[in-house]
Structures are given as structure tokens and as C-alpha cells.
Image (tube, helix red, strand yellow):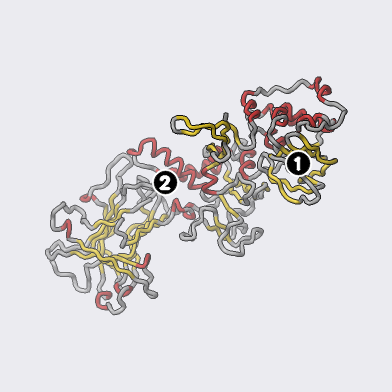
């Protein structure tokens, strides 16, 4: 049989239960006036207390009679409730399609008052206890959470029974609040809820299960204890855990739809991806948004985070190595991401429902700057455009990597590459191509090449530094979602005859607001190639005042969603 945490074998019968309610005209027959019977079960002891009649009716109607009559050990804090309250909980049970632990009555009422094991209370007791719905309750020898203990504990054959003067209110955690507000309409949270709920999984807890033997090389279990987990929460934040303290920025259905309409075009894959491309487009567009939503207020960079008035706040996707992303300044100030939003208190933090999405796409790593270090051999090719294998041009380009930590000339990655052509004929022209990863479709990019100065590695190399460079930049990529990669001979010229100042670190923008029809985000095989060519000479002689050697620090594709994405 398969059992979940906190569920005794008899609870499996609940799966086949109907929503029927026990006949009320037999309830008087359940009670006796003889007091507690030594050795009685929890259920029997509850039934012998007339003031717990209404509570017992809810338990029986929801299948908990058998559970509290079983051998599993529990602690029950039984509240005194009215007949009207009992009727309301029973109706809630019947009207909820779920009849397991997620049923509203079972989760918010019954399991809010029952814990596993025999939890004794004494004058030394002053701690918290975890209930079957995972809520943490404070208890002392006089109280239980917000309720007061009535009388003394009643030892039972399968646990201990306490009586309290009122029900303990159920306080939802953030995930439960999201589920509660998944009510449809533009203002609901259905879209967010459905996305995260799809990541719920169930696995066997081998350490808590009872092995029965090995069949065909696999262990079979007499009792299989299953546990649920959500891989999305494991990645971004355990908003379903009572041990956590989070803020969640939750977009309404309207905001969700509007942002997906904006984000999906960024993830248009080539048709050779077929249905997989459509799935990736949908997934990445949603992750684009939710990666910014989780904030762990117990784990913020720096030592002086003020939860009441933070200078800044970082989402859980924040990476210290990339500090420009997922950090938001003055979140509670006007124009801040939480400004004007009413916090909905939860047992593990706050839910902020928003109909005004203020997070810029460029604050996420999905639309981060793409930087390729010039000296990284994984990304470059020294084969010139149009060169045929075996030709002189095919193997003419030589490169050398230069390391430097100059204080005056800041070089990205502490290194750059020098590109030279070994040929001495009229085709002498240094040239190098870079493959560019993780390019989004239909997102405007400013394409930049950072050229290093020879002085960064050798401050005495002033003669070479005085010589200008002149470059041409060309690009190739998928011509359309169904087309092929642009051929060498048809490479698109981004700029031509642009001078580079070698006396400094010179950043040259070779294209502004350039867009691509096909996304390469997460792709292993490159399909965007930027080629940088040196000055084109008609003879072997180098024009006066110029050098053909290229000193390349890095290539940068800077996303600019603020620009009109219709043109290039």
C-alpha cells in the first residue's frame, strides 16, 4: 500500500469514500456518562466528552473515526465548537472535490488540531509543535496557540487527548494563499497557481518506508511512505514551507497574460525544434517572470537588511557574481516594485498581489548582457569567411592570448587576444569570428566590440599604440524560423571602415537595436556568428598610421528592449 507522511494505513480507505454524512439521529448513542475508560482510544475518549460532540461529528463525517481508532499514535487538541460550526465544516468537506489531506476541512480544521506522536504537556512545556498540516503551534502548560487548555490531558491507548476552549485559526502559508486566491478573473492568481502546481511531484521516502523484500532486483515495500515536493519551489523558494520567511510578488491573471505576450516572442526557436521549441518558448516566457518573484528576507546580501524599510532587496535568483541582476533599489519607495501593494500576511511571510508589474526584463538573467571574452578559444574561429579547407587563407590567421591586470587599462577577464595574418600577399587581412550564445529573438541588441590597447600589457609599447586600427564587422544567423544560416558569402555587413583608437580601451558599437528572428537561448550548437575583419589593403603595404593587428578584449550583445524591435 502507498502511504503519505502522517497517514496511517486505515486512511487509505478515504480514497474510496463518498461525501456522505453520518446520520445525526444516532449520535446520542455514541456517548456514555461513565467518564474516561483506561486504555480507550482517542476516538473513544473524544466520544465520552459531551462538549466535544460537535467536533466528533466533523471527524466522523470526514473519515477520521478510523484513524483515531487505529494503532498510530497521535496528539489531539480537541476544540469546543458549536453545532453550526460543525455543520459548516462538514459542508465544506462535501463541497470540496478533494477528499485527501488537501481537502479544505481536513487541512484547515482537522489536521490543524492533530499532531503525530504522543506530545506530553507539563509545567516545563514552552515550545512549538508541528501539526499534521505542517503548521507550527506554540504551546505551554496552559495554552495551545490562541486557545486555552480545558481540564487535564486524557491518556489514550494511541496517544493523548487535550481539550481547548476554541478552535485554532488556520493561517495559510504563501503557497496556500496563492491557491486560495486562484479564483479566476483578471484579478485572480489562477495562472501563477497552475504553473507552480504543475511542478508538484511525489517520491518514495525509502528511509521512512518498510521494506518487504527484493523482487527482480528491486526492493518492494510493505508500507510505502511518499513525500511531495515541488522542484520549482526548490529552485526559487520554499513558499510552501512553514520554516521559511519569504515575500512573493504575485502577478494577477491579467498581468500574467500581458507579460507572456511580451516575453514569448523573445523565445522563438527554429522550426527544426518542432514541438520542443513551442514548449521551450512557453516555459522560458513563464520562468522569465517568476524568477523575479521570490524574496527570502532571511537571506539578503549585506548585514543591515531592514525588513521594514529596505534600501534594496534581491530575489532568490540573485547571483553575487552577476550583481546587476535581480537586485531592486528602494522597493517600498514610489516606483519601487512593492510600492503601494498591501501585504497579505501568511504563516511564512507576505504575499503581494500586483496588477502593476514594475520589474524590467533587463533585471533578469534571461535578458542579461551576453559577453564573450576575446581570448576564449571555445567561442572563436580563425577560419576567414569564404576560405576553403587546405587553402593558404584557411590557416593564415594566428592568435595569441595576452594576460594583464593593468590598473590603468581595465581589461575584461584579465586578458585579450591578438589577431594577425601570416600571409604576405595582397590578401593580407586579419580576421576572426565569434559564436554568440543565448541570443533572444525579436529583442533589440546593441552589438559592441571592446578593443584593447597594447599599453594594457606593455606600457612601453607606445609605437604600436599610436597606430590606428580599422575594422569591418559582419554577422550571420538563421535568416528565418524556417530558413538556414546565412552563408559566408552573404554575411551581413554591420559596419565598415570604422577606426579604432589603440591608445585606449576603445569600445566600438558595430550595430544598434539589431534583432534576430530565431532564439538561441540554451542552445548547444551556435547559430549566431560575428566576424571582425581588419583593414582591407589592396597591396601588402599597410596604410600610413595604421596597423592590421587586432587586439580584442571582448564582444558584447547588450539587450535594449526599450528600442523599437521592428527594425534593425
Relative vertical location of residue 534 with respect to residue 217 in this rendering, above or below: below
Q: Residues within 10 Å of mark 1 (few under 14, many from 20)?
A: many
In the depicted view, which residue is nearer to us: 124 or 475? Answer: 124
Residue drawn where x is 30% and y is 56% of the image: 378
Judged left or right of residue 151, residue 346 is left
Q: Residues within 10 Å of mark 2 (few under 14, many from 20)?
A: many
Q: Secondary structure at mark 1?
A: loop
From the top left corner, tell me how far across and down residue 562 is, in percent.
45, 54
From the top left corner, tell me how far across and down residue 374 is, in percent.
31, 62
Residue drawn where x is 72% and y is 29% of the image: 69
The residue at the far left in this view is 425
In the depicted view, which residue is nearer to us: 458 or 244? Answer: 244
In the depicted view, which residue is nearer to us: 468 or 56? Answer: 56
In the depicted view, which residue is nearer to us: 24 or 268? Answer: 24
Which residue is the site of mark 2?
266
Residue drawn where x is 52% and y is 39% of the image: 199
Which residue is the site of mark 1?
168
Circles 2 and 1: CB distance less than 8 Å?
Answer: no
Judged left or right of residue 111, residue 382 is left
Q: Quadrant of residue 194?
A: top right
From the top left corner, tell me how far across and down residue 29 is, in percent.
82, 22
The residue at the far bottom in this view is 460
Location of the N terminus by quadrant is top right
How far is the residue under mark 2 from the one under mark 1? 49 Å
Judged left or right of residue 62, residue 186 is left
Relative vertical location of residue 53 with respect to residue 514 in this rendering, above or below: above
Mark closer to the observer (2, 1): 1
Q: Secondary structure at mark 2?
A: helix
Sequence-wise first label, 2 or 1: 1
Q: Is residue 436 in view from this perspective?
A: yes
Amino acid at each position: 500500500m502507498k502511504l503519505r507522511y502522517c497517514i496511517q494505513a486505515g486512511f487509505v480507505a478515504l480514497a474510496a469514500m463518498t461525501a456522505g454524512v453520518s446520520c445525526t439521529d444516532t449520535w446520542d448513542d455514541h456517548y456514555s456518562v461513565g467518564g474516561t475508560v483506561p486504555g480507550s482510544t482517542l476516538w473513544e475518549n473524544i466520544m465520552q466528552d459531551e462538549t466535544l460532540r460537535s467536533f466528533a461529528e466533523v471527524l466522523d463525517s470526514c473519515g477520521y473515526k478510523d484513524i483515531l481508532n487505529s494503532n498510530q499514535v497521535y496528539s489531539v487538541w480537541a476544540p469546543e465548537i458549536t453545532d453550526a460550526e460543525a455543520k459548516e465544516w462538514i459542508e465544506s468537506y462535501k463541497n470540496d472535490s478533494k477528499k485527501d489531506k488537501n481537502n479544505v476541512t481536513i487541512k484547515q480544521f482537522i489536521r490543524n488540531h492533530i499532531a503525530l506522536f504522543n506530545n506530553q504537556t507539563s509545567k516545563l512545556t514552552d515550545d512549538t509543535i508541528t501539526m499534521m498540516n505542517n503548521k507550527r503551534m506554540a504551546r505551554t502548560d496552559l495554552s495551545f496557540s490562541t486557545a486555552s487548555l480545558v481540564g487535564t490531558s486524557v491518556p489514550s491507548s494511541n496517544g493523548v487527548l487535550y481539550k481547548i476552549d476554541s478552535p485554532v485559526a488556520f493561517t495559510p502559508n504563501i503557497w496556500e494563499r496563492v491557491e486560495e486566491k486562484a479564483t479566476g478573473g483578471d484579478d485572480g492568481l489562477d495562472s501563477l497557481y497552475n504553473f507552480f502546481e504543475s511542478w508538484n511531484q511525489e517520491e518514495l521516502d525509502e528511509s521512512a518506508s518498510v521494506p518487504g523484500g527484493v523482487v527482480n532486483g528491486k526492493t518492494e515495500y510493505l508500507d510505502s511512505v511518499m513525500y511531495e515536493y515541488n522542484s520549482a519551489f526548490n529552485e526559487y523558494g520554499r513558499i510552501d514551507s512553514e520554516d521559511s520567511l519569504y515575500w512573493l510578488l504575485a502577478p494577477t491573471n491579467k498581468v500574467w497574460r500581458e507579460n507572456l505576450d511580451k516575453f514569448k516572442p523573445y523565445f522563438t526557436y527554429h522550426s527544426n525544434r518542432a514541438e520542443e521549441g513551442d514548449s521551450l518558448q512557453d516555459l522560458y516566457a513563464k520562468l522569465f517572470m517568476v524568477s523575479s518573484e521570490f524574496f527570502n528576507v532571511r537571506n539578503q546580501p549585506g548585514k543591515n537588511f531592514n525588513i521594514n524599510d529596505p534600501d534594496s532587496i534581491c530575489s532568490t535568483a540573485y547571483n553575487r557574481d552577476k550583481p546587476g541582476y535581480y537586485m531592486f533599489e528602494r522597493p517600498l519607495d514610489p516606483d519601487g516594485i512593492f510600492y503601494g501593494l498591501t501585504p497579505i500576511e501568511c504563516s511564512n511571510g507576505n504575499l503581494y498581489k500586483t496588477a502593476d508589474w514594475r520589474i524590467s526584463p533587463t533585471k533578469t538573467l534571461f535578458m542579461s548582457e551576453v559577453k564573450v571574452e576575446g581570448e576564449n578559444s571555445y567561442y572563436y574561429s580563425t577560419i576567414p569567411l569564404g576560405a576553403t579547407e587546405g587553402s593558404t587563407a584557411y590557416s593564415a590567421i594566428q592568435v595569441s592570448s595576452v594576460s594583464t591586470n593593468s590598473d590603468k587599462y581595465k581589461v575584461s577577464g584579465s586578458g585579450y587576444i591578438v589577431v594577425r595574418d601570416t600571409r604576405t600577399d595582397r590578401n593580407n587581412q586579419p580576421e576572426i569570428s565569434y559564436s554568440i550564445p543565448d541570443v533572444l529573438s525579436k529583442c533589440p541588441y546593441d552589438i559592441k566590440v571592446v578593443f584593447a590597447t597594447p599599453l594594457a600589457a606593455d606600457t612601453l609599447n607606445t609605437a604600436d599604440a599610436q597606430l590606428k586600427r580599422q575594422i569591418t564587422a559582419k554577422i550571420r544567423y538563421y535568416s528565418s524560423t524556417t530558413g538556414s544560416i546565412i552563408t559566408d558569402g552573404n554575411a551581413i555587413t554591420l559596419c565598415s571602415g570604422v577606426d579604432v583608437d589603440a591608445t585606449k580601451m576603445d569600445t566600438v558599437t558595430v550595430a544598434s537595436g539589431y534583432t534576430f528572428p530565431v532564439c538561441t537561448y540554451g542552445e548547444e550548437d551556435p547559430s549566431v556568428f560575428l566576424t571582425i575583419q581588419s583593414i582591407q589593403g589592396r597591396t601588402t603595404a599597410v596604410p600610413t598610421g595604421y596597423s592590421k593587428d587586432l587586439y580584442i578584449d571582448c564582444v558584447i550583445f547588450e539587450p535594449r528592449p526599450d528600442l523599437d524591435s521592428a527594425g534593425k
